[in-house]
Amino acid sequence: MKALAPGSTIGILGGGQLGRMLSYAAARLGYRCHIFCPEQDCPAAQVSAAATVADYDDRTALSAFAEQVDVVTLEFENIPVETVRFLAEKITIRPGAKVLEVAQDRLFEKQTVQHIGAKPAPFEPVGSLIELEQAMQNIGLPAILKTRRLGYDGKGQAMLQTMDEAASAWDRIGGGDCILEGLVDFALEISVIVARDSAGATACYVPVENRHRDGILDRTIAPADIAAETAEQATAIAVRLASDLDVVGLLAVEMFVTRDGQILVNEIAPRVHNSGHWTMEACLTNQFEQQIRAVAGLPLGSPDRHANAVMKNLIGDEADKWQEILSQPGSALHLYGKSEARPGRKMGHVTRLWPLNQKPEI
Ligand code: AMP
């Protein structure tokens, strides 16, 4: 595909805040966005030129959408792979089905990590209560039972401290295809976001530290306070994964750094990522523009940062403090246009910057 001319339309599957911010970035480069998502009045549709409200398996709506856009990307990795395959017969879609299939399944994810020579947390696939009990013996406790598919932000997970908890955890999670993971006693959690274009060129943002609360990202600190060698290794892992999975667009790779400096890969997402929101204020080319550039066949921009940053998510009623945040001159506030502040719902975020030679206050 040659470079998409300004004025063209980029189709986005998914209508959340990531799609909303992709849409701003596309607009800056002269593109229009057309959102495809099942919900009315979604955050992305509020700021885009067009929207189709339909289910991801509605082939009539998908065909009409494909007719109206010049390229398709996504903001959500749980889009059914069949939807992506169906669209791919009609139009260029980036990233493609290959990376999506891996990112949607924790077992495939871990096998891919091993395939490129990196390490996941200790794990075993489990498909029954008996297999779970065996895996608990093999891996040791504490451990976390996770569904292979459709888990995010700590959903579809159960912590296991003792052997007696096996049956109740298995019931709570609803059985099915799962994996058991050993609990990693990490020093910190980091992520690397790599952009990759269709010619295989890559650009990486600096590794950042992610602090979670109740399984949801609370803060991102850029850069992560880790040894230069650890940062290099983490970056190299992200690039190898993006290349192995033929990603055109972005790949976010979440990793644990253990107390002895080892890196264990936790999760991947083939899209812009919550841990990259700080790039909007602190980098010349932010993650959203980078995904648009890769998808539109433009050269990647510089991922270098001109400031250190802390991004704080505003979850549930934390966003009620919007006026107070706006009265702090050094805070950049983003609100996602969601009408109802349910507990655990990401309503917005706020980023603060520090000079490059200064450690951010957390
Ligand atoms: P996930 O949905 O797999 O990203 O898990 C959400 C969060 O739970 C992670 O960011 C970690 O804070 C924690 N977590 C998940 N898996 C493990 C593990 N094997 N060991 C320790 N903490 C974990």
Image (spheres, rainbow, N blue to C red):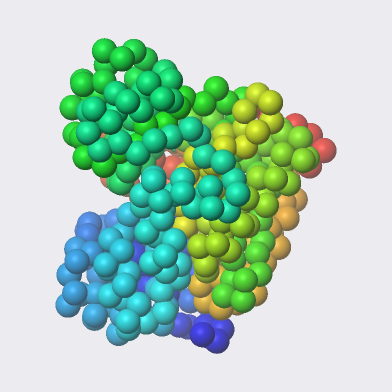
Identity of the residue drawn at 43% across and 25% down:
139
Q: Relative to residue 270, is residue 235 drawn left or right?
A: right
Q: Quadrant of residue 146?
A: top left
The C terminus appears in which quarter of the rendering? top right
On screen, residue 144 above or below 5:
above
- Toward the viewer: 133 or 242? 133
Q: Picture coordinates of residue 244 (x, y %)?
A: 55, 62
Q: Where 56 falls versus 140 (above or below)?
A: below
Name the residue located 54 percent from the left edge and 30 percent from the top edge: 211
Residue 275, how many percent across, how many down?
Answer: 54, 44
The count of marks equals 0
Quarter residue 141 falls in: top left
| Residue drawn at point x = 63 percent, y = 41 percent | 208
Q: Is residue 317 visible?
A: no
Position in image of residue 133 (x %, y %): 29, 23
Instruction: Specify the quarter for ligand 1.
Output: top left
Query: 51 or 94, which is in the foreground?
Result: 94
- Left or right, 340 with reference to 240: left
What residue do we see at 61% from left, 57% from top?
A: 240
Query: Can residue 127 be seen in this snapshot?
Result: yes
Residue that sits furthest to the right in the current view: 357
Left or right for 77, reference 251: left
The front one of 57 and 21 is 57
Q: Quadrant of residue 58?
A: bottom left
**Residue 300 at x, y = what percent?**
64, 69
